Image (spheres, rainbow, N blue to C red):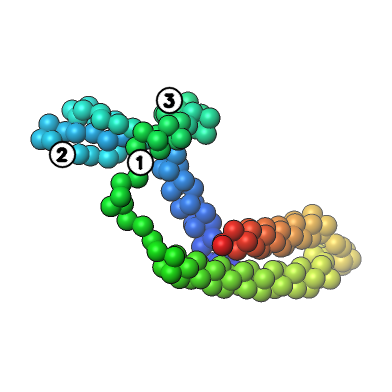
Amino acid sequence: MFSTTLNVMKKLLFIGALLAISSAVFAETCKYQDAEGRIIYTNIPLKDAKKLTCFGFDAGSKPGSNARSSSTARSAQPTPSNFPRVDAVTQKQRDDLRRSVLLEELAAEQKALEQAKKEYAEEEANPEVYRRADGKIMRNMAKYEEKMKRLQDNIELHEKNIQMLQKELASIK
């Protein structure tokens, strides 16, 4: 149970990091020249620097954005010929590594799903009971339903993780 909780925490941390990175991606980045003539690229406006150009997403992709459309930005600023590129062999190696990591995660999630389903089945047959003052044994339905809901949520979490991993694997060329 502890390893399952640890895996869930790792995944939540990973998703949080992805969200933090994605918010930075949508920021409009500008090229500035400071008083000493240094070129600075930033998404934070600089007061004591001259704004030379900006690039980012078009207004339709980011609410409140006043950036030029991405097609205009591309045609106005072509990629420099000395811009670093990844050759096909290197990209294939990266894709293969990514695929293997995702397959390992998928296998771990499938194993965790099987375990969660097993726990659900075991606990489903194990009702919550208490003994009244007169000695009669009674079922605590609220506690039982709460326990089963938690176990069902755990199953659904693993199922969603599996779906997302499969989707990610399908997107690799």
- The residue that label 2 is drawn on is 38
Answer with the quarter of the image where residue 126 lies. Answer: bottom right
> Residue at the location (67% across, 71% down)?
110
Task: Tell me if label 2 and label 1 are in contact, CB under 8 Å.
Answer: no
Q: Nearer the viewer, mark 2 or mark 1?
A: 1
Answer with the quarter of the image where residue 117 lies. Answer: bottom right
Which of the two labelled residues, at mark 1 and mark 3, occupies the earlier sequence position? 3
- The residue that label 3 is drawn on is 66
- Give the amino acid at mark 1: Pro
> Residue at the location (10% across, 35% down)?
36
- Give the amino acid at mark 2: Arg
How far is the residue under mark 2 from the one under mark 1? 22 Å
Q: Secondary structure at mark 2?
A: loop
Could you say which is closer to the camera, residue 6 or residue 96?
Answer: 96
- Give the amino acid at mark 3: Asn
Q: How many marks?
A: 3
Is residue 72 something that shows in the picture? yes
Q: Secondary structure at mark 1?
A: loop
Q: Position of residue 50 (x, y in %)?
A: 21, 28
